[in-house]
């Protein structure tokens, strides 16, 4: 079942007198429970695609359909509510609120939605256990390491079990060890919680955790790889690097 | 220089709104200071000039020892001139009268000094001697001839013009014996002696005036011109003693300057109040400066980090910020000077209305300009000091770090401890109340300072518990996103403290002004109801014989007419020096039928007190005199009567604001017996129940109006005018309180804008995960709301303490002891003001936050 679909997506920016085409007719879909990585060289349009999929930006042409609902044409408030209830975000910079504890940061989407956070206690405990921060739930962000902060951000994105989780370079600000832990967590959320994930990254090691990798170049989808469950990480990694090198060399 | 051009001027150009905002507080503070000091100075000068002009070059004056109808024998003039050192003795006979052609004014004249009937003053003088003593500039015709019996008069030009009188005309002057005609021979300018009685003034030969008013052989005052060799005060004092010895006890030798003391004292009291408030406005201005500069530091952290990276030293950066402050302070202060000069023009008009004196436009004194400038610039630098140091301390790495909770210094963490001690000690001083009569109010000012400092130090510690406590309220008012906003005030406690502090000062100022006004006005109104009691106020420019009372009572509709007479007297206690004050004589029986006395709290039976007064040899003392000299009912005071010092027992202490509160009330019978005066200034008339006061007023006017030149006014309208005069006097205080709150609201705008800028990425993230624009705005409003509440509540506490302090201060400085009155509505009003101001101030930042573009914000570093 398709959870997210992009049809003929176009996005152009006006930079002074120059028109930049960031996306030029992208067709793309994600099925429920799938973990998709989007890769591409700098300026290829991968972040733009993610922003359009998340309703953070409006396309110049084409449509985005999330859980059967078309995002373009909705009012700002409608899109915001759509994001609140159906989309989870993980950013490169963890973007936690410094005044809230880890637990409160995780419950933020619930609080924003005006729901009673106590109703989420069970799932919160499970998430804290998943990210391994049960004993640090009352710490504030400035008392947590970068990796821990990013794990809190992940739990925040998962708390209201969104239809889709969008991650923008989630390991971009982490060292290799914490990056690995983070990617394992994302993989487990997909496998254990059945969470659908779309992740933008330029790190082949991170992309290797996905079920499918989509390569973008010059605003269009250039290639795709579908991994089988038997493929181990080193094999996936080699495949990805090969395609990336090819894409970059062909520029 | 290049650095200044590159960094400073460009930073100004980039942030013009901020520059204006920062300057605003300083401009207002400086303008307030300057205009108040200039206006008061010109009012004081006007009073002094009036005295100097009207007393001319006389260094000593001789007046009757017992005032009220008493005069000096004319022979005394030659006796005085024979004293060694006296160059010339200049006699003056003063009469209050009216032009026959001049219709009685429709309203009673009102000023800070009470009611007056208008009319004109004529001085009977010896023309030759007079010209040596005082300046007269003849603008038309001539001055008086040397003939002492010439039937002629000289009037002030403006007064003659107002009454359509021309030189060469014979004009009618009203005397107790009918209209007398004299020839108008000349006009003088309204300057020098021409300023007497605000220009409603004329001079005529001594004998002529004596004849017209049946006062042959009498003078009221002898001015003494002293030989030029008498320059020192010691010589003058010696001369005064010699003259006094020669004249005996019948006359008093005084210095002309002592006569303006009343006005000077009153102006000083008023100025202390206004100065304090403009000081507070400047203080709030310093808050604003701090806020604006702290904001600049937040905004430019990256810039400072980068500058440090490329080699700028800490000192250079701090100096750069201080230089910005200096430029702003200078510009703000100069603008303030300009505004202050404009303001002082308006204030002068207000003041001249209150004092009933023409204020001449004064050159602005250099000292006032310098003081205002130094204060303006000093306060700016002081306000910018901390942010400038913060800017210097930005490390190159800090510029790249994500900002969370800012580091907190010792004062923020532990400041509440000394704060509690300061607050407790200032409250203790208040309860102990050691403010004995002290015109400088030194300990009181120290307490004010302790209070401010104490509250400011406690605030940071109060922020977190307050935020926790108010969370349910915030959630109720602003929804779930509100809690996110309220948490933010903990993020930079220093900044929140400063903003709350500014709001607190504004709220406290409103309360103080309201509290003082309410306490003062409630007492004043009570007294004024009595002072202007009855239904009709009957006044005249000429003294009203007591037979007028029975004539008034005979008019249909009049229930009672009570005479009132004001008499300058000298008095003392067993131990104190001789003082001058005013005796108000009333007939206790008729007076209490028309109106009543306002007894101070804790009195014995009022009926008994009135009876005691009626029995004689007793007085009521005003609360101000009682406070000032520690006198209470049962004590004895002495008044100088025609037969020497006579004891009077104090039957009661009454509230009285006439003559700056320095009043003695006595009985009519005592006044007749001891001062031999039997005429009234005023009658208070009560009409019979069911009678229309306006109708009775018309009847009185028809029957007696013309004969006695009566000025009649319904007390309702008189009271209304008196209260509006009162409101005018208090309006300045209101204006200053409003300025404080406006400046405080600018502080809120600053803090929130800063908070929104700092949290741009956070807001972007919140928007991304589903916070609507509306919720973002509510989040910012909640942050402001909680600061408003905190400022409001603390402001109320501080306001109540300050009001009490000022009431003590007023008792200590002027002797007015007022009951503390603060209506609960006032408290609620202040809280509402704090909330409304905080919400209005938050609107723009909230809008700015709501409009945060998500993509730009989440990529913002």
Image: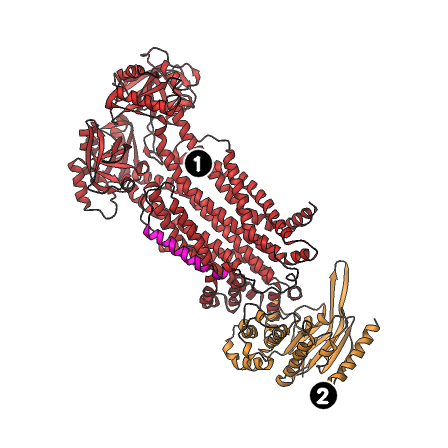
Image quadrant in which you'd find residue B621: top left
Helix, strand or loop for the magenta stretch, by majority: helix
Asked if residue A95 shows in the view, the reply is: yes
Task: Give the residue drawn at x 16%, y 40%.
Answer: B611
- In the rendered structure, the answer to whether residue B561 lies left or right of residue B754 reads left
Q: Is residue B436 magenta?
A: yes
- In the rendered structure, the answer to whether residue B60 lies left or right of residue B359 reads left
Q: Residue B100, position in %: x, y?
A: 32, 22
Q: What residue is disc 2 on?
A: A229
- In the rendered structure, the answer to whether residue B155 lies left or right of residue A191 reads left
Q: Secondary structure at mark 1?
A: helix
Q: Nearer the viewer, residue B373 or B616?
A: B373
- Quarter holding the C terminus of chain A is bottom right
Chain B visual colour: red
Q: What residue is disc 1 on?
A: B40
Image quadrant in which you'd find residue B207: top left
Q: Which residues lie in the magenta part? A: B412-441
In the displayed structure, would residue A54 be above or below residue B628?
below
Chain A visual colour: orange
Asked if residue B566 shows in the view, the reply is: no
- Find the residue positioned furthest to the bottom: A230
Q: Is residue B757 magenta?
A: no
- Find the residue positioned furthest to the right: A250
Q: Residue B848, position in %: x, y?
A: 59, 59
């Amino acid at each position: 079942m398709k959870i997210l679909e992009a049809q003929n997506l176009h996005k152009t920016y006006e930079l002074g007198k120059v028109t930049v085409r960031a996306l030029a007719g992208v067709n793309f879909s994600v099925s429920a429970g799938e973990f998709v990585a989007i890769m591409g060289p700098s300026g290829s349009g991968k972040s733009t695609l993610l922003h359009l999929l998340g309703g953070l930006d409006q396309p110049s042409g084409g449509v985005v359909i999330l859980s059967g609902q078309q995002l373009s044409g909705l009012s700002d408030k409608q899109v915001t509510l759509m994001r609140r209830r159906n989309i989870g975000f993980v950013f490169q910079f963890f973007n936690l609120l410094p005044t809230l504890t880890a637990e409160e940061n995780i419950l933020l989407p619930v609080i924003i939605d005006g729901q009673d956070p106590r109703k989420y206690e069970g799932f919160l405990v499970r998430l804290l256990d998943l990210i391994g921060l049960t004993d640090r739930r009352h710490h504030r962000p400035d008392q947590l390491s970068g990796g821990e902060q990013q794990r809190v951000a992940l739990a925040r994105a998962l708390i209201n079990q969104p239809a889709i989780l969008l991650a923008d370079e989630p390991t971009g600000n982490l060292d290799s060890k914490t990056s690995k832990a983070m990617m394992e967590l994302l993989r487990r959320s997909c496998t254990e919680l059945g969470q659908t994930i779309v992740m933008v990254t330029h790190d082949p090691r991170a992309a290797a955790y996905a079920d499918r990798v989509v390569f973008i170049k010059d605003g269009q989808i250039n290639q795709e790889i579908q991994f089988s469950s038997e493929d181990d990480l080193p094999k996936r990694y080699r495949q990805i690097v090969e395609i990336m090198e090819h894409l970059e060399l062909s520029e | 220089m290049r650095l200044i051009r590159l960094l400073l001027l460009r930073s100004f150009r980039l942030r013009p709104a901020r520059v204006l905002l920062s300057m605003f507080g300083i401009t207002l503070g400086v303008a307030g200071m300057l205009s108040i000091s200039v206006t008061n100075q010109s009012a004081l000068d006007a009073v002094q000039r009036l005295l100097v002009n009207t007393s001319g070059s006389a260094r000593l004056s001789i007046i009757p020892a017992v005032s009220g109808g008493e005069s000096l024998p004319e022979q005394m003039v030659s006796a005085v001139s024979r004293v060694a050192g006296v160059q010339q003795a200049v006699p003056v006979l003063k009469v209050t009268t009216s032009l026959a052609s001049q219709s009685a004014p429709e309203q009673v004249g009102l000023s800070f000094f009470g009611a007056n009937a208008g009319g004109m003053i004529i001085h009977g003088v010896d023309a030759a001697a007079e010209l040596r003593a005082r300046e007269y500039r003849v603008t038309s015709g001539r001055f008086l001839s040397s003939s002492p019996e010439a039937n002629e008069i000289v009037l002030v030009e403006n007064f003659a013009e107002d009454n359509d009188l021309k030189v060469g005309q014979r004009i009618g002057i009203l005397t107790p014996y009918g209209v007398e005609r004299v020839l108008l021979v000349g006009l003088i300018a309204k300057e020098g002696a021409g300023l007497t009685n605000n220009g409603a003034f004329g001079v005529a030969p001594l004998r002529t005036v004596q004849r017209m008013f049946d006062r042959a052989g009498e003078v009221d005052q002898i001015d003494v011109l002293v030989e030029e060799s008498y320059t020192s005060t010691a010589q003058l004092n010696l001369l005064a003693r010699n003259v006094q010895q020669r004249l005996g006890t019948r006359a008093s030798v005084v210095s002309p300057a002592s006569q303006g003391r009343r006005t000077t004292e009153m102006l000083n009291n008023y100025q202390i109040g206004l100065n304090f408030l403009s000081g507070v406005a400047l203080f709030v201005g310093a808050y604003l400066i701090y806020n604006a500069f702290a904001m600049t530091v937040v905004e430019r952290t990256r810039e400072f980090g980068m500058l440090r990276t490329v080699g700028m030293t800490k000192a250079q950066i701090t100096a750069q910020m201080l230089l910005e402050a200096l430029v702003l302070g200078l510009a703000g202060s100069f603008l303030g000077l300009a505004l202050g000069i404009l303001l002082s023009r308006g204030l002068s008009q207000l003041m001249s209305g209150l004092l009933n004196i023409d204020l001449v436009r004064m050159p602005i004194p250099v000292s006032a300009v310098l003081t205002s400038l130094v204060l303006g610039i000093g306060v700016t630098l002081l306000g910018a000091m901390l942010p400038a140091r913060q800017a210097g301390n930005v490390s190159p790495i800090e510029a790249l770090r994500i900002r969370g909770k800012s580091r907190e210094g010792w004062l923020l963490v532990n400041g509440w401890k000394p704060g509690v001690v300061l607050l407790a000690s200032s409250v203790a001083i208040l309860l102990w109340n050691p403010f004995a009569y002290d015109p400088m109010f030194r300990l009181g000012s120290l307490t004010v300072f302790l209070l401010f400092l104490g509250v400011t130090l406690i605030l940071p510690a109060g922020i977190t518990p307050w935020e926790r406590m108010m969370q349910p309220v915030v959630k109720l008012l602003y929804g779930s996103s509100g809690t996110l906003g309220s948490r933010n005030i903990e993020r930079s406690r220093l900044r929140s403290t400063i903003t709350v502090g500014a709001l607190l000062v504004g709220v406290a100022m409103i309360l103080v002004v309201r509290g003082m006004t309410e306490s003062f006005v409630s007492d004043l109104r009570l007294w004024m109801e009595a002072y202007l009691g009855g239904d009709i106020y009957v006044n005249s420019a000429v003294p009203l014989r007591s037979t007028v009372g029975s004539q008034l009572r005979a008019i249909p509709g009049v229930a009672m007419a009570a005479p009132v007479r004001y008499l300058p007297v000298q008095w003392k206690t067993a131990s104190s020096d001789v003082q001058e004050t005013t005796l108000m004589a009333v007939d206790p029986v008729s007076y209490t039928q028309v109106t009543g006395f306002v007894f101070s709290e804790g009195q014995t039976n009022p009926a008994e007190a009135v009876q005691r007064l009626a029995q004689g040899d007793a007085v009521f003392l005003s609360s101000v005199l009682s406070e000032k000299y520690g006198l209470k009912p049962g004590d004895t005071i002495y008044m100088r009567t025609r037969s020497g010092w006579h004891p009077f027992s104090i039957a009661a202490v009454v509230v009285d604001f006439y003559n700056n509160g320095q009043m003695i009330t006595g009985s009519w019978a005592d006044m007749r017996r001891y001062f031999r005066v039997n005429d009234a200034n005023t009658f208070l008339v009560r009409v019979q129940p069911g009678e229309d006061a306006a109708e009775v007023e018309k009847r009185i006017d028809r029957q007696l109006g013309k004969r006695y030149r009566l000025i009649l006014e319904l007390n309702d309208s008189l009271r209304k005018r008196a209260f509006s005069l009162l409101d005018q006097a208090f309006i300045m205080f209101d204006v200053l309180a409003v300025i404080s709150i406006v400046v405080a609201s600018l502080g809120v705008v600053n803090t929130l804008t800063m908070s929104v800028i700092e949290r741009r990425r956070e807001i972007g993230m919140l928007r991304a995960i589903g916070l609507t624009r509306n919720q973002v705005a509510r989040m910012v409003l909640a942050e402001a709301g909680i600061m408003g509440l905190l400022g409001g509540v603390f402001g109320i506490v501080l306001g109540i303490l300050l009001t009490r302090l000022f009431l003590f201060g007023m008792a200590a400085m002027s002797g007015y002891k007022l009951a503390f009155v603060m209506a609960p509505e006032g408290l609620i009003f202040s809280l509402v003001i704090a909330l409304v101001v905080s919400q209005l101030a938050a609107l723009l930042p909230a809008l700015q936050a709501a409009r945060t573009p998500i993509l730009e914000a989440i990529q913002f570093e």
